[in-house]
Image (cartoon, rainbow, N blue to C red):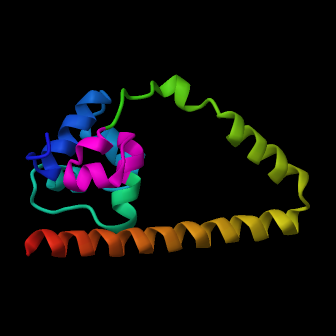
Amino acid sequence: MATSTIGQRILQRRKENKMTQRGLAQAAGVSYASISLWESDKTEPKGKNLHSLAEGLQCSPTWLLFGDEDQTPGEPIPEEKKLLLSEDEEELLKLYRALPESEQSAHINSLRARVDNFNNLFEELLKARKRNQLK
């Protein structure tokens, strides 16, 4: 499905997840109108919205933008199973709770900074890829 548009991939994945536009908007933390504009290919999600959308759709931002075959998402995880934590997540939570509050805050801030740096790097890589595709 690499020849499809980003809007078609958003719509396809939303339907695979059995979500309404409003449900996806709520999951991604964006407006219902944004979902509609993206699905109709009038605009494209950028930055944090792209990552939130990918998380809500249970797929990679790269697949959303480019339809890469090797990034094709698997079966959606049912809502009741999303709440279950993996072993690593459980361990992370236990370790976090074992720290004093001041250390918890420091680690949260550190993780936020790392995620922001990753998102910025990802955005730069996507821009470079788009520039290369236009050549």
Q: Nearer the viewer, residue 5 or 31?
A: 5
The image position of residue 64, as x and y in percent, is 26, 50
| Numbered circles on residues, count | 0
User: What secondary structure is the magenta-colored segment mainly?
Assistant: helix
- 59 relative position to 37: left or right: right
Considering only vertical position in the picture, is 30 above or below 16? below
In this rendered view, identify the residue nearer to me: 117 or 31: 117
Residue range of the region highlighted in magenta in the rendering: 53-72
Image quadrant in which you'd find residue 111: bottom right
Q: Tell me what residue is drawn at x 22 percent, y 44 percent.
A: 10
Q: Is residue 55 located in the magenta-colored stretch of the structure?
A: yes
Instruction: State whether residue 32 appears in this view.
Output: no
Q: Position of residue 65 (x, y in %)?
A: 23, 56
Is any atom of residue 23 visible in this view?
yes
Of the 4 image quadrants, the one containing the C terminus is bottom left
Up the image or down, 112 lies above or below 69; here it is below
Percent across and percent down for residue 103 are: 85, 67
Residue 115 place in picture, x, y as percent: 55, 66
Q: Name the residue: 33% across, 59% down.
A: 50
Q: Nearer the viewer, residue 131 or 75?
A: 131
Magenta segment includes 76? no
* Residue occupying image coordinates x 39% and y 44%: 56
Q: Quadrant of residue 52?
A: bottom left
Q: Is residue 122 left or right of residue 110?
A: left
Left or right: 13 as drawn, with respect to 106: left
